[in-house]
Amino acid sequence: MKFVWLLFLTLASPAFAQTDGSVSIDWKDTPPAVVEKIDCGMEPSFVTRRPFAGGVVYAAQCPGNHANYIQALVYAEDAQGQNARLLMFPRPGRKDASNPADSLSNIRWFPKARELTEVFVDPESQICRTEGRWRLDAKAQPQLIYWRQTHDCKGRSRWRVVVDRRK
C-alpha cells in the first residue's frame, strides 16, 4: 500500500506543481532583460516564471531569514522578457510612500483577481507582522489595496487596518 501511495505522489506531483502555470527555470536561462532588473545581492540559482495579469511574472529568490521567503518580481509582456520592469510595491505611511519595496515576502498569488499578497514577520520591530495586498495592471506598477499590521508576531490579535481599498 505504501508503494502505491508513493507512486501516486510521484506521478501526481508534477501535475499539482503546474496547476498555476508556474515553472522553475535556471538563472542562466532567464532572459537578459529580466536578469538586469533583479538585484538581490546574490545570483539566484533559479527563478520561477508564471503567467499573471496579462503577461509573465518572474520571481527570483533573494536572501531571507527563518520567517521570510523573499522574492524580487519582474513583470514582462512575454516569456522572452519583452519590456521587463522590476515591480515596486508601495507601502502605507508618509515615509514609505516615496520608497516602495523592490521585493515581497511569503507571497500568495491570486491570478483571477490579478492580486498578490505578502506576509512579513520581523520580531525585532515594534510592528512585528504586516500583511499587504496589491493589484497588478499590465501597464502600471502594483497598486496597494489592503494593508494591516500588528504587534503580535503570530498574527492572532490586535490587527490595525491601515489601508483598505478593496472593492
Image (cartoon, helix red, strand yellow):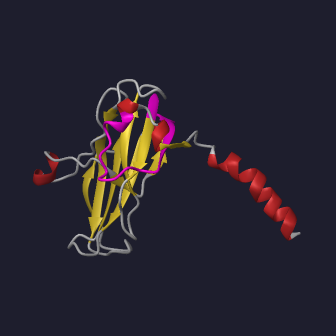
Q: Is residue 25 visible?
A: yes
Residue 96: percent from left, percent from top? 15, 52
Residue found at x 35% / y 49%: 133
Q: Nearer the viewer, residue 116 or 9?
A: 9
Span highlighted in magenta in the image: 34-56
At 40% from the left edge and 30% from the top edge, which residue is drawn?
A: 76
Rendered-image quadrant of the N terminus: bottom right
140 relative position to 96: left or right: right
Extreme residue toward the left, this view: 94
Q: Who is closer to the viewer here, 102 or 113?
A: 102
Q: Residue at x 86, y 63 (%)?
A: 4
Q: Residue at x 40, y 71 (%)?
A: 66
Q: Is residue 145 above or below residue 162?
A: above
Q: Is residue 61 magenta?
A: no
48 sits left or right of 13 in the view: left
Tell which residue pokes out farthest to the front in this image: 28
The reply, left or right, for residue 152 in relation to residue 108 is left
Asked where in the image residue 53 lies, by quadrant, the reply is top left
Q: Going by the image, does 9 lie left or right of 136?
A: right
What percent of the width, then of the height, locates residue 116? 41, 46
